[in-house]
């Protein structure tokens, strides 16, 4: 997990996304313990209330759950849930932005498709 | 209960009004930033909070009680500032030994740990310390007191970047172990902003705003686009900052646009981005003369 203190993105969202990334990358596994509020606050020098806000966001979304006396844990099925959510963001956010920029630059859909194929071939994504 | 509550708090020095009708209250167990330019009234407010001086008019209560001459409250707070007066003949170790007399929660272990961490020698006299070392020692006293209300007036004055970082880490760790109300004053949010839960911005002795850090982060946005689109759009808006570059314009405004306004801007290729907390504070406390200096450059 990484946090950029200077970013304009609110810190609690950076925390939530950072934990999500760690779940997607199998650094945090389902049913295992996630980071605690105090761990996050100490590690990144941020107010513990901010850390709690990021964690609570994931609890509300069902990605983390509180185990009594044992702290935050990763929910079963969290990885799938994050993928679904990110997919949605991919369509509504990234893809939309891409198409808008393409429009500005007069790039046709065929050209974009061609670029994607070419990039896949080159970098093996 | 509120940690601090002030109503129409006013302080005058002869005819100059330094604090002007401050009204706000602060919850317990938060880290709060008191932000303002030089001469905004930060130290005067903290001194009144600490019972060192009396308000000219209005009311201030700490933990629900009057502060001035009230040992009940005074024993529960600590006030750390730039030119703390300790007896010139006392060694640092002597001052620390007196700690428990003034503060009933005094943590001697923490004091020793902090002295070691800052590399302060306890045989030295306070008057012989350098600017930065004085700040370090003040921090030792401020944190070791474990006071329920901890008032830190520009605590990082003269500290280098590495020591400042140590201080922020120590402050947070200790706060998490022993939650209490901590007010830190500074003229710049900068490095502090992620430590804080709430921010009080004052200017010319008046309260400019009191918000949670999260709200302040969302306070303002920049519109960056063609002047003929942006200029008419911001006509009836509160403009925080304005920059022109040829035919383009960057306007900083409050972040309260409707969906239709946002989509209008979007359709007209106006880029929208957030204004940092620090810049919001600078814009909100800017004096008229400041921009003229800019213009001459």
Image: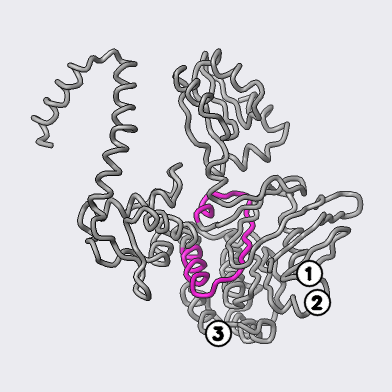
How far apart marks 1 and 3 lie (CA) works out to: 25 Å
Mark 1 surroundings: few (<14), some (14-19) or many (≥20) residues within 10 A = many
Sequence-earlier tag: 1 or 2? 1
Q: Answer with the quarter of the image where residue A84 lies.
A: top left
Question: Which of the pair A11/B130 is nearer the observer?
Answer: A11
SS for tag 3?
Answer: helix
Q: Colour mode?
A: one colour
Instruction: Give the percent coordinates (x, y) of residue B118.
Output: 49, 71
Q: Secondary structure at mark 2?
A: loop
Q: Residue at x 12, y 26 (%)?
A: A117
Residue B108: image location, x then y, percent: 55, 84
Over which residues does the magenta segment extend? Answer: B166-194
On the picture, is A12 further left or further right than A72? Answer: right
Say if B151 sits above or below B42 in the image. Answer: below
Residue A33 image offset from top left, x and y in percent: 29, 67
The residue that mark 2 highlights is B70
- Cα–Cα gap, marks 2 and 3: 26 Å
Q: Tell me what residue is drawn at x 55 percent, y 81 percent.
A: B122
Parent chain of label 3? B
- Callout 1 touching callout 3 (CB < 8 Å): no
């Amino acid at each position: 997990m990484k946090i950029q203190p200077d970013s304009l993105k609110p810190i609690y969202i950076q925390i939530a996304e950072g934990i999500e990334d760690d779940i997607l990358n199998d650094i945090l596994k389902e049913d295992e313990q996630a980071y605690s509020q105090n761990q996050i606050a100490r590690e990144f020098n941020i107010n513990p209330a901010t850390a709690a806000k990021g964690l609570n966001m994931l609890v509300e979304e069902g990605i983390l759950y509180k185990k009594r006396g044992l702290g935050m844990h990763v929910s079963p099925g969290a990885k799938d849930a994050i993928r679904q959510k990110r997919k949605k963001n991919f369509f509504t956010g990234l893809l939309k932005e891409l198409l808008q920029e393409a429009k500005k630059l007069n790039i046709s859909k065929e050209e974009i498709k061609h670029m994607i194929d070419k990039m896949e071939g080159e970098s093996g994504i | 209960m509120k940690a601090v509550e002030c109503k129409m708090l006013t302080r005058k020095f002869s005819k100059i009004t330094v604090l002007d009708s401050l009204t706000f209250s602060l919850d317990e167990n938060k880290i709060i930033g008191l932000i303002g330019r030089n001469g905004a009234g930060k130290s005067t407010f903290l001194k009144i909070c600490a019972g060192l001086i009396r308000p000219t008019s209005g009311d201030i209560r700490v933990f629900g009680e009057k502060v001035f001459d009230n040992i009940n409250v005074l024993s529960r707070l600590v006030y750390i500032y730039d030119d703390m007066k300790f007896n010139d003949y006392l060694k640092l170790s002597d001052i620390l030994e007196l700690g428990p007399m003034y503060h009933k929660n005094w943590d001697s272990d923490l004091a020793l740990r902090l002295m070691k961490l800052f590399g302060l020698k306890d045989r030295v006299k306070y008057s012989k310390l350098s600017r930065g070392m004085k700040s370090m020692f003040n921090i030792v006293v401020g944190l070791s007191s474990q006071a329920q209300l901890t008032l830190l007036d520009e605590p990082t004055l003269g500290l280098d970047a590495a020591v400042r970082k140590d201080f922020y880490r120590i402050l947070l760790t200790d706060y998490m172990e022993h939650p209490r109300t901590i007010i830190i004053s500074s003229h710049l949010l900068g490095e502090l902003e992620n430590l804080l839960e709430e921010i009080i911005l004052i200017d010319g002795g008046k309260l400019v705003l009191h918000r949670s850090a999260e709200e302040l982060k969302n306070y303002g946005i920049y519109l960056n686009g063609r002047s003929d689109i942006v200029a008419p759009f911001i006509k009836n808006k509160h403009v925080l900052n304005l920059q022109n570059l040829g035919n383009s314009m960057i306007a900083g405004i409050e972040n309260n646009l409707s969906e239709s306004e946002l989509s209008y801007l979007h359709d007209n290729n106006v880029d929208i981005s957030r204004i940092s907390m620090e810049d919001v504070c600078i814009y909100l406390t800017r004096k008229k003369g400041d921009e003229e200096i800019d213009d001459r450059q």
